[in-house]
Image: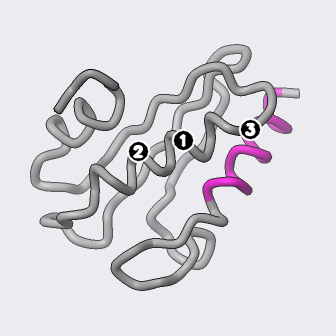
Amino acid sequence: MAEELATRAKEAIYGLVEEETGRKLGELTIVTEVVEVAPGSIKVRFTPLSAYSPTAVDLGRRIRDAAGRVEGVTTTVVECDGHMQDELVNTLVNHPKAP
């Protein structure tokens, strides 16, 4: 069941269009991990196309929201890896009250 939920979340994420290229995330290699870490809890790791990507926060939020819309997903944590400001990106993506 865990693999099924992660697979459905991955399919939802892979359908998103990356704004800088206009290509679907499934065509790119930026989503490196989608796993169910606890029942209903999905962790997604991605690497933006550029270490200085101005759209990393927006992309992370879109990934979070796409996974969160999958039936059975109760929480989603998105980790950015490879951006010059990973920590800031992760904070802005995963904490809804962050600016």
Specify whether 97 is left or right of 43.
left
Cβ atoms under marks 1 and 2 closer than 8 Å:
yes
The amino acid marked with disc number 3 is Val
- Mark 3: which secondary structure? loop
Circle 3 residues within 10 Å: few <14, some 14–19, many ≥20: some
* Residue under pointer 2: 61
The amino acid marked with disc number 1 is Asp
Say which mark, if any, is on residue 65: 1
Quadrant of the image for the C terminus?
A: top left
Distance between mark 1 and mark 2 Cα atoms = 6 Å
Q: Quadrant of residue 5?
A: top right
Q: Determine if the magenta segment contains residue 7.
A: yes
Circle 2 residues within 10 Å: few <14, some 14–19, many ≥20: many
Q: Main secondary structure of the magenta part?
A: helix
* Residue under pointer 3: 70
Q: How is the image coloured?
A: one colour
| Mark with earlier residue (2, 3) | 2
Q: Which residues are magenta?
A: 2-13
Specify whether 8 is left or right of 83.
right
